[in-house]
Image: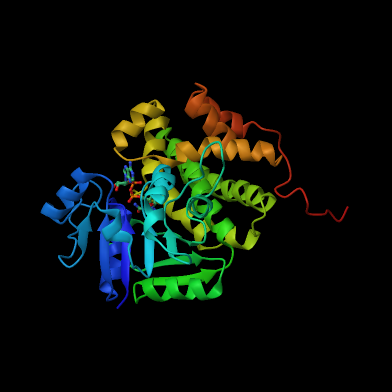
Amino acid sequence: MAKVAVLGGGGWAIALAKVLYENGNDVTLWSFLQKEVDELTNDRENKICLPGIKIPEAIHITNSMEEAAKDKEMIVMAVASSYVRSTSKLLKPYVDEGQIVVDVAKGIENETFDTMTEIIEQEIPGVEAVVLSGPSHAEEVARNIPTVVVVGAKKFKVALKVQNLFANKVFRTYISPDRKSIELGGSLKNVIALAAGIIDGLGFGDNTEAALITRGIKEITQLGVEMGGNAKTFYGLSGIGDLIVTCNSKHSRNRRAGVLIGKGYTLDEAVKEVKMVVEGAVSAKAALELARKYNVSVPIIEAVNQVLFEGKTAIDGMWELMEREQTNEYRDLQWDE
Ligand SMILES: NC(=O)c1ccc[n+]([C@@H]2O[C@H](COP(=O)([O-])OP(=O)(O)OC[C@H]3O[C@@H](n4cnc5c(N)ncnc54)[C@H](O)[C@@H]3O)[C@@H](O)[C@H]2O)c1
């Protein structure tokens, strides 16, 4: 049995705490929010994010970072991505060199463009920062619905250790050394999921959405490869896998926000209605700036930014994408004649 901690009290933190507990580990769940700690302790449930899922009594819930973080074999960072930096600062005093911290939050920080493991490494030098990502909704993981994810780490031994702690019959876990691409795929897909929701909200069909997913992964891959990632990873679980689940699933908050925007809501109105952080909106800005920096053409990401932040109507954004110059699917493929 290993002592592990999960930082965060939302749906993903609870689902992963449950996986780790069911694998026989001693689990502590930490939240920054005292109100959340009180509710989780009293109700043994997050009634908003994960209704109907009971947190096992043996999982200790605390607001004390010292209690949560000290002497743990693995710490899982499962707060919303905008709090990964502040939570890493709180964590730093209680961990030693080589501490394994597994990020499961998805996002790219605005302005710095840092990924979550990069933020963790900056705030806690000497840490072994790992990512776990893939097509995995908390609502399904918490109900033991078969799920497959990938763990990305710099060191093989560290990846193996994390794989062993998480893996079970219903939670299959691959490992990979391509941490950067895993993180980029997991963040950028939220932007495309917003676009998929917008298309649905506008009342378009399955053809339109399938086209968006396909052209969307192409944008993500091209940008990711320019940034030093490996194309294969973008066609794997954390890339196309996560993109498919996010674009198609009723559980996806980014998609749900997109549907509302397609129906005419502003971004603020949609976020209020969804009642959760819509990370795709944050990543959309970072993705566009990165694309400009690396000189990659990303028409879908650009259109999402125009609709979210520049007052373009969703319907105009959609038609402008369709009316772009007709061209080759892949410009680098050669013609016989
Ligand atoms: N929910 C899912 O199915 C799922 C699946 C895979 C990955 N993720 C990723 O995991 C992360 C967490 O997602 P989620 O759905 O559990 O919740 P969320 O993104 O809605 O985050 C809410 C949680 O963040 C924490 N938080 C809020 N304010 C904070 C603060 N000031 N400081 C520190 N922590 C604070 C709280 O514990 C709160 O419950 C996100 O980055 C998400 O993209 C979620």
Do we see residue 144 in this rendering? no
Q: State the residue in front, 98 or 271.
A: 98
Do we see residue 164 in this rendering? yes
The residue sitting at 25% across, 53% down in the picture is 64
The residue sitting at 49% across, 71% down in the picture is 159
Q: Quadrant of residue 67?
A: bottom left
Q: Residue furthest right?
A: 337
Q: Residue furthest left?
A: 42
Q: Is residue 267 left or right of residue 25?
A: right
Residue 258 location in percent, x, y? 41, 36
The residue sitting at 49% across, 59% down in the picture is 241
Residue 188 location in percent, x, y? 53, 46
Residue 47 location in percent, x, y? 18, 48
Q: Residue furthest top?
A: 311
Position above or below: 14 against 36: below
The residue sitting at 71% across, 37% down in the picture is 326
Q: State the residue in front, 257 or 124.
A: 124
Q: State the residue in front, 336 or 140.
A: 140
The quarter of the image holding the N terminus is bottom left
Residue 288 location in percent, x, y? 59, 36
